[in-house]
Image: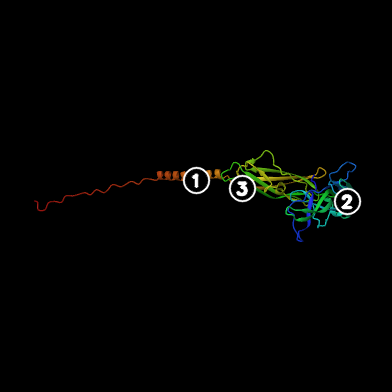
Amino acid sequence: MRRLATAAAILAAALLGTPAAAEEAPPPAAWEVLPAPDDDGPRQAFELTLDPGQTHEDTVLVRNRGPEEITVDVWATDAVTTPSGDLGLLLAEDAPRFAGAWITPATARLTLEPGGEGAVPFTVTVPENEQPGDYVAGVVVSMPRGETTSTGERVLVEARVASRVYLRVPGDLAPAVTVSELTLTRDAPWWNFWSGDTRVDFTVTNEGNARLMPQSAVTLSSPFGPLSAAPATVALPELMPGDRLRASALTGVADSLVLPGVPAWGLLSADVSVLARLSTGPDAVRETATVTAVAVPWVPAAVVVLVLARVAFGTVRLVRRRRAARRPVPTTAPAPVEEVVAAPAVGSA
């Protein structure tokens, strides 16, 4: 289960009256936020199932881990999935539309002594006409504070820490996942046909209304069959309804999955299969997509072309020789012989 990432947003900065941007990430917040234990013990997140129109009361704990007294703001907003797969929060200026708008803390501000802990009750009320599905929000505890950058600039930063609230509105759940935008490339010198890096990338989208826990499997094949004994995998985070994630953004590399030592046998194909299970229950959906790429083995191809050219040239010469051998040889007729008749001598008796 993902944690709700600590978020820090620059609200304003001033240096001699002019705005400036912070160049470094602010230090970690000096407080922590977590659900109050329930009858089953400690909780990592709030997991709620509420019907439309139903109201639920719960409590979030805020602990001051720092050496100074702090005064923090308490509020709620929708959670969103970042491109890298982490669970983040809406920007402070963006109004929540779903579960974040259904949560009302009992107090909007809390002051804590060093090492102190405070409990903040809150209520969750689902609208009467809300559609079935899974929703996620965060109970946020934030505090603006001044920071100094490495260049000496003073900036005002809002540090935010939140506790996750997963909320399911029961009804007709329609889990659906799609795999799209597949790419397949092979990277190797032209002369190296027996071993090269093959890269696969794809996009996974939660098209349904249920929270999904996906698993991926990538099988690479040539015209002669699969190129590995077992499928390769890309770790996928949980997908909330509407989430759309690119695998390469999750792995942090240009292409999501790199398979080394892949030979080039003319054609390569990658089958990407995603099995997505509901966060609760045994139900699951599967989606498979295939991408094909040409991987020309240039050295064997060049050898084959040369051999075929040599065979073709030798065949042409052989055919010509055989045709010449079967052609009839013309015979030369003998030259005519002229008969010489001696004339009688003149004046003979």
User: For the residue labelled by badge 2, is the local secondary structure a helix, a strand or a loop?
Assistant: strand
Residue 142 placement, left or right of 288: right
Q: Dot 3 lies on which element? A: strand
Image position, residue 135 (x, y; %): 83, 51
Residue 284: which numbered mark, if any?
none
Q: Nearer the viewer, residue 327 or 264?
A: 264
Question: Residue type at mark 2?
Answer: Thr
Tell me the distance, in whole angstroms, between the alpha carbons under discs 3 and 1. 24 Å
Residue placed under numbered mark 1 in the picture: 309
Gap between marks 2 and 3 measured at Cα: 64 Å
Q: Is residue 225 left or right of residue 154?
A: left
Q: What residue would you read off at disc 3?
A: 294
Q: Nearer the viewer, mark 1 or mark 2?
A: 2
Q: Amino acid at mark 1?
A: Ala
Q: Nearer the viewer, residue 106 or 276?
A: 106
Tag of residue 111: 2
On the image, which quarter does residue 277 sit in? Answer: top right
Amino acid found under the numbered disc labelled 3: Val
Counting labels gives 3
Q: Is residue 125 visible?
A: no
